[in-house]
Image (spheres, rainbow, N blue to C red):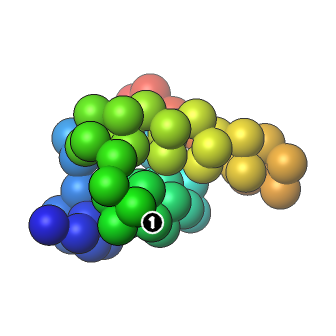
Amino acid sequence: MPWTKKDYPQSLKNFMAPIRNKAIEIGNELLEKGYEEGRAIAIATAKAKEWGEDHDKQIRKKDR
């Protein structure tokens, strides 16, 4: 089942929306290509963080 902005892996909950959305986009592409969900999560998370750093985006939500 594809991930959405409202239904995504729990491990993405502490990321800022732009990073989380990029991870969702990448993850869905990987799932479509047949990757297992756990592997897709790991790759999508790493690539989304890299994308965020390259675009000077805040990666994670700040601690309260």
Q: Measured from the top left, where is residue 63 in percent x and y?
A: 44, 27
User: Does residue 27 appear left or right of residue 16 in this picture?
Assistant: left
Residue in the picture at 49% in, 46% down:
44
Query: Can the viewer see residue 9 in this picture?
Result: yes
Question: Label 1 belongs to which residue?
Answer: 29
View extreme (top): residue: 63
The quarter of the rendered structure image containing the C terminus is top left
Q: Residue 55's x, y, as percent?
A: 83, 56
Q: Residue, x 45% and y 66% (percent of image)?
A: 29
User: 28 or 17: which is nearer to us?
Assistant: 28
Return the x and y of residue 3 as percentages of the image width and height: 25, 65
Determine the secondary structure under disc 1: helix
Q: Position of residue 15 (x, y in %)?
A: 46, 44
3 in relation to 12, above or below: below
* Residue displayed at 24% across by 56% down: 8
Q: Quadrant of residue 27?
A: bottom left
In what quadrant of the picture does the N terminus appear?
A: bottom left
Side of 18 where 35 appears, left or right: left
Q: Which of 26 and 4 is in front in this view?
A: 26
Query: What amino acid does circle 1 point to?
Result: Glu
Is disc 1 surrounded by few (<14), some (14 to 19) or many (20+) residues within 10 Å? some
Tell me if I can see residue 16 in this picture.
no
Q: Is 57 left or right of 29, judged from the image as shown? A: right
Nearer to the camera, 55 or 25? 25
At x 56% / y 54%, what residue is drawn? 19
